[in-house]
């Protein structure tokens, strides 16, 4: 199969006294995401989308939160390792589309940095990494600033040297 699509979603609680990392970028805020790693909700969703596209399970399967190895790990490392699994299967990314749901802080000033960070790891151009953000209009746990959510979709394409053709 030449193309594979995958979707990912991730949720993290927000709490005082944690740093907030989204898309591989530290964002100044009085709350940060809670998790075993650095709790980067966007990178985790992208990892799950990539792994899901090839039916390789999810981020928790490959990087269990019970493992000391992954305690407070930089999620850019998890993204890199997930991408390596994709390349091992003979695929590369065509593009990433993602949506962040959070009430505060406003992340628009950080989106280009996130795009650059993610594109560098995934061997993409920045215009192949879409990051959108929305609030939930004060509704639900996101609206109450108890947590944040990220959704990601990726398109993978079989790399030429792995497509089995003999042109």
Image: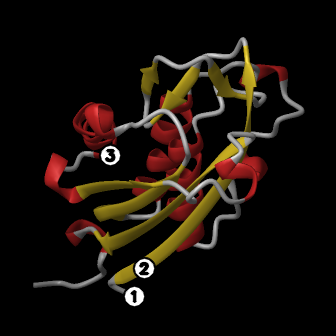
Earlier residue among tags 2 and 3: 2
Name above or below for residue 4 compared with residue 106.
Answer: below
- Please, is residue 156 above or below residue 140 in the view? below
Residue 77 horizontal/vertical position (percent): 52, 29
Question: Do residues under tags 2 and 1 come within 8 Å of each other at their CB atoms?
Answer: yes
Q: Nearer the viewer, residue 141 or 118?
A: 141
Residue designated by label 3: 122
> Of residues 56 and 36, which is closer to you in this image?
36
Please give the name of the residue rendered at 36% of the width and 65% of the height, measured from the top-left corner.
91
Marks 2 and 3 sit apart, C-alpha to C-alpha, by 16 Å
> Percent x, y for residue 36?
78, 28
Assign a secondary structure to mark 1.
loop
* In this rendering, the label closer to the viewer, 2 or 1: 2
User: Residue 34: x and y, percent?
Assistant: 75, 29
Choose between 76 and 24: the one closer to the eye: 24
Task: Name the residue tied to disc 1.
Answer: 1
Q: Mark 2, residues whose alpha carbon is within 10 Å: few (<14), some, or many (≥20)?
A: some
Comparing 1 with 26, the one in front is 26
Q: Earlier in the sequence, mark 1 or mark 3?
A: 1
Q: Which mark is residue 4?
A: 2
Residue 97 in the image: above or below residue 43: below
Which part of the image, by quadrant, shows the C terminus? bottom left
């Amino acid at each position: 199969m030449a193309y594979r699509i995958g979707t990912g979603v991730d949720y993290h609680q927000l709490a005082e006294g944690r740093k907030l990392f989204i898309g591989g970028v530290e964002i100044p805020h009085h709350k940060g995401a809670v998790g075993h790693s650095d709790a980067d909700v966007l990178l985790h969703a992208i990892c799950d989308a990539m792994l899901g596209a090839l039916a390789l399970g999810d981020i928790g399967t490959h990087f269990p939160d019970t493992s000391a190895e992954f305690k407070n790990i930089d999620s850019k490392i998890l993204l890199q390792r997930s991408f390596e699994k994709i390349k091992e299967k003979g695929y590369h990314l065509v593009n990433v589309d993602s949506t962040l749901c959070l009430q505060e802080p406003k992340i628009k000033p950080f989106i280009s940095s996130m795009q650059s960070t993610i594109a560098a790891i995934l061997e993409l151009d920045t215009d192949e990494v879409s990051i959108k953000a929305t609030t939930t209009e004060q509704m639900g746990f996101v609206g109450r600033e108890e947590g944040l959510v990220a959704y990601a979709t990726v398109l993978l394409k079989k790399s030429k040297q792995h497509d089995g053709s003999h042109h």
